[in-house]
Amino acid sequence: MGEKTARNEEGYPDPTFGGAWGNIRREEKQRESERLAKISDLIPVMKQTAELAGFEVVGRIILRDKGTGKEYR
């Protein structure tokens, strides 16, 4: 109860599609989580590198994933 089931064009439940779609979404969320973890590790390194070179980061660092084109702010 409370669980949504994917439905076909006629409105009948389609558990095969629903299961496949759920797996795809789960994999996408996992990849996004991994990207965010990398960014969380990367930003402090970038700031430390600037500090070692005698600079400081004064603005927002924006990163673009080369594979997906998605920007992280």
Image: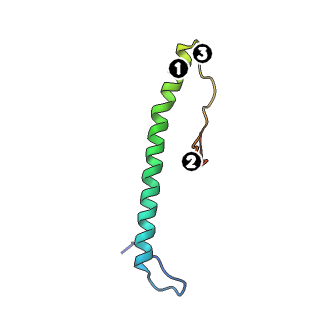
- Residue at 44 percent across and 40 percent down: it is 37
* Alpha carbon separation for disc pair 3 and 2: 30 Å
Callout 2 secondary element: loop
Query: In the rendered view of the protein, which quadrant contains the N terminus?
Result: bottom left
Position of residue 3 relative to residue 32, above or below, is below
- Residue at 40 percent across and 78 percent down: it is 15
Give neighbour class at mark 2: few <14, some 14-19, many 20+ (Cα, 10 Å): few
The label shown at residue 3 is: none
- Residue at 47 percent across and 56 percent down: it is 28
Mark in the foreground, 1 or 2: 2
* Alpha carbon separation for disc pair 1 and 2: 25 Å
- Residue at 44 percent across and 80 percent down: it is 14
Give neighbour class at mark 1: few <14, some 14-19, many 20+ (Cα, 10 Å): some
**In the rendered structure, which amino acid carries the disc numbered 3?**
Phe
Q: Earlier in the sequence, mark 3 or mark 1?
A: 1
Quadrant in the rendering for residue 71: top right
Q: Position of residue 19 (x, y in %)?
A: 40, 71
Whether residues under marks 3 and 1 lie with C-beta atoms below 8 angstroms apart, the answer is no
Q: How many marks?
A: 3
The label shown at residue 67 is: 2
* Alpha carbon separation for disc pair 3 and 1: 8 Å
**In the rendered structure, which amino acid carries the disc numbered 1?**
Thr
Q: Which residue is mark 3?
A: 55
